[in-house]
Image (cartoon, grey):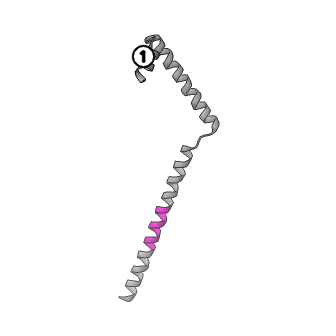
Amino acid sequence: MGVFEFILSIVAMVFGAITIWILLLRKDRRREHIVPQGKYDLDELATIAESLQERIDILESILDAEVPDWREQNESGGQ
C-alpha cells in the first residue's frame, strides 16, 4: 500500500497545482477585459462630450417649444 499512497498523493498535488494555475489564469483574463473598457482617448472623450452637448441642446429646444417658461419654473423650484 505504500506505492499506492505515494502515487495518490502525487496525483492530488498535481491536480491541486493545475487548479490553482487555472484560477490564476482566469483572474488575469478578467483584469485584461476590465482595464481596456475603462480607458478612453482624449479624442473619444471629446467626441462623447460633443454628442452629449448636442443632445442637451435638442432637449432644451424641445422644452422651449413645449413649455416656454420651464427655465424659470426649474430655477424657482430648485431653491
Q: Secondary structure at mark 1?
A: helix
Quarter of the image that includes the C terminus: top left
* Viewer-side residue, 75 vs 36: 75
Residue carrying label 1: 73
Above or below, 28 against 10 in this view is above
Residue lying at 60% horizontally and 35% vertically, measured from the top left: 45
Percent position of residue 63, x then y? 46, 15
Range of magenta residues: 14-24
The answer to whether 54 appears left or right of 72 in the picture is right
Percent position of residue 18, x then y? 46, 68
Q: Is residue 25 magenta?
A: no
Residue lying at 47% horizontally and 16% vertically, measured from the top left: 71
Q: Residue furthest bottom?
A: 2
Q: Residue furthest left?
A: 1
Above or below, 65 against 75 in this view is above
Percent position of residue 37, x then y? 54, 44
Q: Residue 7 lies in what quarter of the image?
A: bottom left
* Viewer-side residue, 50 vs 37: 50
Q: Residue 66 lies in what quarter of the image?
A: top left
Residue lying at 56% horizontally and 25% vertically, measured from the top left: 53
Callout 1 amino acid: Gln
* Viewer-side residue, 65 vs 12: 65
Quarter of the image that includes the N terminus: bottom left
Magenta stretch, main secondary structure, is helix
The answer to whether 16 appears left or right of 55 in the picture is left
Circle 1 residues within 10 Å: few <14, some 14–19, many ≥20: few
